[in-house]
Image: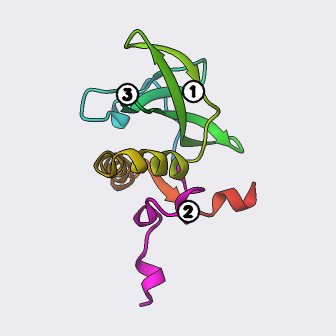
Amino acid sequence: MRLKDVITPEMKLGRPDFENTVFMLNNPLTKLNLDHFAMQENLLPQPLDEVAYAMPAYLSDEYNLFFVYAPNMRGRWSISCSQVQIANGTDVVAMSNVVPMGTGLNAVNQISASAAIELIAYLKTLEVNRLGYFDEDIWKTM
């Protein structure tokens, strides 16, 4: 077995080659399966519009990141990242365009490596539960 064969996409956290890694979902997020995507057992994705959902992933004084669950990879569902601006402690006043999971996690990693690892753990839990998977090649077909 070659070393390249045992390095999974999430093991590249913090490296430039992780930037385009996407977390693909095996099925759409719906009201019926929403609880399967809970973070820390009580934080659930909330409706963003008629289709998409969003959930705070990392909040700090310097940087705020939300996970966005939507069919934004040629109609296939994935979890992307959006940087948000928050006013009055709880009001989201602006959201950036979504970026791949790797880009968002690398940004968090620059501020707090332990927080980025916790977010990887959340995604790995989804992967173990067969809800999604890391894909570092899908962007090549876009």
Quadrant housing residue 87: top left
Residue segment shown in magenta = 1-23
Percent from the top left, x then y, of residue 118? 30, 47
Q: Amino acid at mark 1?
A: Ala
| Rendered residue at 35%/36% (across/down) | 36
Percent from the top left, x then y, of residue 20? 60, 56
Element under disc 1: loop
Mark 1 or mark 2, whichever is nearer to me: 2
| Proximity of marks 3 and 1: CB atoms separated by less than 8 Å | no
Query: Most extreme residue toward the front, as rendered?
Result: 62
Query: Most extreme residue toward the bottom, as rendered?
Result: 1
Task: Say which label, 3 or 1, has the lower sequence index.
Answer: 1
Which residue position holds label 3?
61
Colouring of the image: rainbow
Nearer the observer, 54 or 94:
94
Q: Is residue 3 left or right of residue 74?
A: left
Percent from the top left, x then y, of residue 108? 42, 45
Which residue position holds label 1?
52
Instruction: Let me know if residue 33 appears in the view.
Output: no
| Proximity of marks 2 and 3: CB atoms separated by less than 8 Å | no
Task: Say which label, 2 or 3, has the lower sequence index.
Answer: 2
Element under disc 2: helix
Q: Amino acid at mark 2?
A: Pro
Res 105 label: none
Question: The C terminus is located in which quarter?
Answer: bottom right
Mark 3 or mark 1, whichever is nearer to me: 3
Task: Say which label, 1 or 2, has the lower sequence index.
Answer: 2
Query: Most extreme residue toward the right, as rendered?
Result: 142
Res 16 label: 2
